[in-house]
Amino acid sequence: KAGVTQTPRYLIKTRGQQVTLSCSPISGHRSVSWYQQTPGQGLQFLFEYFSETQRNKGNFPGRFSGRQFSNSRSEMNVSTLELGDSALYLCASSLAGLNQPQHFGDGTRLSIL
Amino acid sequence: AQKITQTQPGMFVQEKEAVTLDCTYDTSDPSYGLFWYKQPSSGEMIFLIYQGSYDQQNATEGRYSLNFQKARKSANLVISASQLGDSAMYFCAMREGGNNAGNMLTFGGGTRLMVKP
């Protein structure tokens, strides 16, 4: 069974640009969550999508947005990039249920110059 | 207040010995789940073990076991017979709410484990 796939693996952008990251979940998983990981703030929850609807949202500015398609694939978009957006962005998918673990992709490492 | 606290930023353990990584949590929700993840230097997050708030027994998965003390709100990860490949960052995470509450995980700051040969 294929794992969670994130593309691209690495991305370099400049301030003010926008970026779109993609995530393909494990087959059968309808929940997709996004996290930002930085050395200073650690792992922080961005948002979760379930059946094409945003179900939870973390404490991030509106520049961070996402969506989920009918095949459960998800994208996240960051507009007007800032230096502080440099981070590892992790996508995770899971089955429904409190005891179901989230399975993570390898992440997209975004660097802002 | 921090919801998940991992008080050991870094730890060393001798190969083949056991090691305990500490995790305390804070929640008022009676229904929650606790997860441990391993993150090697390559970056991927690997799920290790799960403990539910209503589980009567401590979870075990191979060399991993969870020392769950509900009254103390602690969920320490025990790794037995450490291997060199266990060197990595370890994160404790919590999900609150029942089955329909969504999948938001709150993570601790992590513990970097280094296994010495």
Image: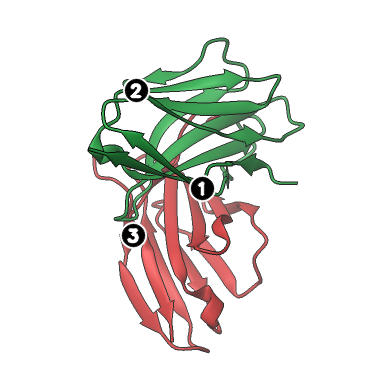
For badge 1, the amino acid type reads Pro
Q: Nearer the viewer, mark 3 or mark 2?
A: 2
Quarter location, residue B70: top right
> Could you give the CA–CA distance between mark 2 and mark 1, rounded to whole angstroms?
20 Å
The residue that mark 2 highlights is: B80
Residue B14, horizontal then vertical, whole percent: 31, 33
Q: Residue furthest top?
A: B56
Which labelled disc corresponds to residue A6? Answer: 3
Q: Is residue B30 left or right of residue B68?
A: right
Q: Is residue B38 left or right of residue A79?
A: left
**Residue B23 visible in the current orientation:** yes
Look at chain A in the picture and name its colour. red
Chain ID, mark 1: B
Task: Let me know if marks 2 and 1 both belong to one chain.
Answer: yes
Q: Is residue A82 above or below residue A38?
A: below
**Residue A96 visible in the current orientation:** no
The residue that mark 1 highlights is: B9
For badge 2, the amino acid type reads Ser
Chain ID, mark 2: B
